[in-house]
Image (cartoon, coloured by chain):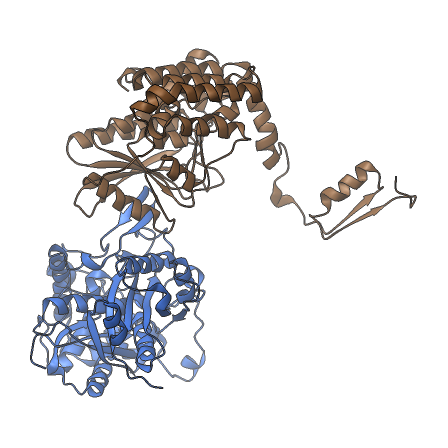
Chain colours: A blue, B brown
């Protein structure tokens, strides 16, 4: 019964991302409320979607416990007011949770099992620090399957610097500075705000409305970055300034078969071309986007030179640079992360994949000269994930 | 109200040594239109079991914060002010815990005046004011909302009411004047007189919306977000319709008639001994023609007379006994000390023992009753 449907990205939204911890704007806000409110915002701005026809809700979270546990896709769907007959489930692939929610449900659409789905992710790293309560199998260490610090993401990034000596701290800092500057410019141009769903949040000083990301530091300078500590290794290269922080946030998007989207007159912001995940050594998890992207390109029958826009998750500057070097792309190539990335905006683990898609979709509309773009990210425990998208606004000859 | 500005309220603080203060916090919210809304949160720092209440210190803090907002409004820093409460609660009204201790009528007048001064500022900020009724809003809590220019309500707010007449008081922080002029005399009579006398019946959010107490209602999940967006629309000229607001015909023809009918009905049901319904009826009758300043002054006088009267004291005693103490018996040990009860045994099966058995019946696993003779009386 394989239908072979084309999958389209109808729309995507997210909450503003907060800084994790007691001083962060979402400290008193529940994780499930973040994703529920994002979902309600998505539904509200797509009134043409018949809620009865939504076939699946897939919501990712890395640390699935407490207010971030209990089969999020199902509970969030009920809380967002979806009809009871709309099913849902939860997903975990660490940093690529939301990306996996998209690819898994996209597979279902291609198969013909679904017409319309909601996919997204949430991570409240303030309430649920990464790996909290996890109990890794002792064999990992006793049999030396992975190094003891493979779960320490900062250490994996330092190791990436070791492996590629050309990736210096200076390059990483310069990249990080550009990320901050690009986010500030994208905000000034109003490119980010379009897809944010404001969230009311209680602080010790009363209710407030979180309408913009909390993490960006537009005042960042190279001198400031150079002076930061390297907490993962003495005389190391990875700092809080050239890495993403700890954040709270949620993202959701709607996917549909092209046929359904056309019939219902839904917006089509992107069409999925291919996707791929690939495993790498957990100790250098940051290299994951390289094999994942090669695999996704191969499956799409495309070459890296066909890609006109890149949305690369910035867990660490060094990991983006490793990807760019591999494909021979300049550090400051304007096709890469035009609106900046996670170093400035933040990286609430399982939610980030859809943020990349939201930003790529926004750029597609502004770049009709571009036909293909990709979203890619590295994944803790040594994986990479890549989704290649086609621009429906492309104005070239087919 | 300018008439209240010069009054020194410090002597009221003697009545508030044990007050659980409801603090007023403010945060500026940037609206989509670019305007700035000063969002005030009322929060006593405790959970929903101890609702926000308004004692002298709480009112003075709220008053100071509103003065600061009107200065900011004059400076062009803000374009609107909104008030909301902590989770599930706007406010449960005046702090009545010490009202029985008010030593004389002059102090009672001041209590009313302080409420009028603080809440009345919501209509004198120089910018529109909103109250987002996010939960429980009783008595003075609802009067905060009535003093503002616009109101939204959470579709799951647990209760909305002006229960003063039930307690032997009247809505004395503007309610007796503002409500009939907002939703019409017949609706106001229902809320201020009829419902309190029907064993203190409360309004559901849907009723509050239909009566016109609230201008808009939103679901709980995004209540604050949607209320803020709605406020932005109103600040940018979106009209707000109030079909129940009394017009000329109602004022001239219907008003006094409705009050007279209500008075008759109260006389039939209650007789004429209880004072508060009649005081409220009189205020409601006058609300047709007097201006706000005069109306508030009459409320001050009316509620003060009731506060120092015997009926209110008796009523508070009764209220404590049958409402408050029923939930939380005086002197009862902390419930965390209690041990779980499994079986309950009752010796005897006479009239009293049988009632004991019945009382325990739903609380334990089983109840065993025994008596010496097998013959029940």
For the image, the number of numbered tags is 0
Looking at the image, residue B261 sits to the left or right of residue A289; the answer is right
Looking at the image, residue A174 sits to the left or right of residue A292; the answer is left
Kindly indicate the quadrant of the structure image that contains residue B43. top left
Residue A186 seen by the camera: yes
Q: Position of residue A184 (x, y in %)?
A: 13, 57
Q: Is residue B239 above or below residue B187?
A: below
Q: Position of residue B341 (x, y in %)?
A: 71, 49
Q: Quadrant of the N terminus of chain A?
A: bottom left
Q: Position of residue A309 (x, y in %)?
A: 13, 73
In front here: B164 or B213?
A: B213
In front here: B351 or A64?
A: B351
In front here: B290 or A321?
A: B290
Looking at the image, residue B271 sits to the left or right of residue A247; the answer is right
What residue is rendered at 21% in x and 32% in y?
Answer: B127
Q: Is residue B186 above or below residue B35?
A: above
Q: Quadrant of the C terminus of chain A?
A: bottom left
Q: Position of residue A155 (x, y in %)?
A: 28, 72
Q: Is residue B135 above or below residue A189?
A: above
Kindly indicate the quadrant of the structure image that contains residue A151. bottom left
Residue A235 seen by the camera: no
Looking at the image, residue A379 sits to the left or right of residue B315; the answer is left
């Amino acid at each position: 019964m394989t239908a072979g449907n084309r999958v389209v990205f109808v729309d995507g939204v997210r909450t503003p991302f907060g800084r994790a911890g007691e001083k962060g704007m979402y400290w008193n806000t529940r994780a499930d409320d973040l994703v529920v409110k994002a979902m309600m915002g998505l539904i509200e701005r797509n009134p043409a979607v018949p809620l009865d026809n939504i076939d699946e809700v897939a919501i990712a979270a890395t640390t699935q416990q407490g207010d971030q546990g209990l089969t999020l896709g199902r509970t969030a769907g009920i809380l967002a007011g979806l009809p009871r007959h709309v099913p849902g489930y939860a997903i975990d692939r660490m940093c690529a949770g939301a990306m996996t929610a998209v690819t898994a449900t996209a597979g279902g659409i291609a198969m013909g099992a679904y017409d319309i789905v909601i996919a997204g992710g949430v991570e409240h790293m303030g309430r649920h620090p990464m790996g909290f309560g996890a109990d890794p199998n002792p064999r990992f260490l006793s049999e030396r399957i992975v190094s003891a610090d493979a779960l320490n993401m900062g250490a994996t990034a330092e190791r990436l610097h070791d492996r590629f000596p050309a990736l210096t701290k200076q390059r990483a800092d310069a990249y990080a500075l550009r990320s901050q500057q690009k986010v500030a410019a994208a905000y000034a141009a109003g490119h980010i705000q379009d897809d944010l769903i404001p969230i009311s949040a209680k602080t010790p000083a009363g209710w407030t409305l979180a309408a913009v990301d909390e993490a960006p530091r537009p005042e960042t300078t190279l001198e400031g970055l150079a002076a930061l500590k390297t907490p993962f290794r003495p005389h190391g290269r990875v700092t809080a300034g050239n890495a993403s922080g700890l954040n709270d946030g949620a993202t959701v998007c709607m996917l549909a078969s092209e046929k359904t989207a056309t019939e219902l007159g839904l917006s089509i912001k992107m069409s999925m071309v291919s996707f791929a995940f690939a495993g790498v050594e957990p100790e250098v998890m940051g290299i994951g986007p390289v094999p994942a992207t090669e695999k996704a390109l191969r499956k799409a029958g495309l070459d890296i030179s066909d890609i006109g826009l890149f949305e690369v998750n910035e867990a660490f500057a060094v990991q983006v640079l490793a990807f760019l070097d591999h494909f021979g792309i300049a550090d400051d190539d304007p096709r890469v992360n035009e609106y900046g990335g996670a170093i400035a905006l933040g990286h609430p683990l399982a939610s980030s994949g859809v943020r990349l898609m939201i930003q790529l979709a926004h750029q597609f509309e502004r770049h009709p000269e571009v036909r293909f773009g990709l979203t890619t990210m590295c994944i803790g425990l040594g994986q990479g994930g890549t989704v290649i998208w086609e621009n429906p606004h492309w104005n070239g000859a087919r | 109200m300018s008439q209240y500005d010069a009054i020194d309220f410090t002597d009221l603080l003697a009545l508030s040594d044990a007050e659980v203060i409801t603090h007023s916090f403010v945060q500026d919210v940037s609206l989509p239109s670019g305007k700035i809304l000063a969002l005030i949160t009322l929060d006593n720092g405790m959970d929903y079991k101890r609702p926000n209440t308004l004692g002298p210190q709480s009112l003075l803090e709220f008053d100071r914060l509103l003065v600061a907002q009107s200065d900011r409004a004059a400076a062009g820093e803000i374009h609107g002010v909104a008030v909301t409460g902590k989770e599930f609660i706007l406010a449960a009204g005046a702090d009545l815990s010490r009202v029985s201790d008010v030593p004389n009528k002059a102090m009672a007048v001041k209590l009313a005046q302080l409420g009028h001064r603080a809440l009345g500022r919501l209509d004198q900020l120089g910018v529109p004011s909103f109250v987002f009724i996010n939960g429980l809003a009783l008595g003075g809590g609802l009067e905060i909302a009535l003093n503002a220019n616009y109101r939204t309500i959470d579709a799951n707010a647990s209760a909305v009411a002006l229960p003063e007449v039930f307690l032997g008081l009247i809505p004395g922080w503007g309610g007796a004047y503002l409500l009939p002029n907002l939703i019409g005399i017949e609706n106001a009579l229902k809320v201020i007189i009829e419902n309190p006398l029907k064993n203190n019946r409360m309004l559901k959010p849907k009723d509050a919306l239909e009566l016109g107490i609230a201008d808009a209602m939103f679901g709980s999940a995004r209540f604050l977000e949607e209320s803020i967006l709605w406020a932005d629309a109103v600040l940018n000229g979106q009209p707000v319709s109030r079909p129940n607001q009394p017009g000329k015909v109602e004022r001239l023809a219907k008003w006094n008639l409705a009050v007279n009918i209500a008075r008759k009905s109260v006389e039939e049901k209650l007789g004429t001994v209880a004072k508060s319904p009649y005081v409220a009826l009189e205020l409601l009758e006058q609300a047709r023609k007097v201006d706000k300043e005069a109306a508030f002054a009459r409320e001050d006088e009316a509620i003060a007379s009731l506060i120092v009267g015997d009926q209110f004291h008796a009523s508070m005693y009764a209220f404590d006994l049958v409402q408050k103490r029923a939930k939380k018996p005086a002197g009862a040990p902390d419930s965390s000390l209690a041990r779980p009860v499994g079986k309950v045994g009752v010796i005897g099966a006479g009239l009293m023992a049988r009632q004991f058995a019945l009382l325990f019946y739903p609380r334990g696993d089983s109840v065993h009753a025994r008596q010496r003779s097998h013959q029940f009386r």
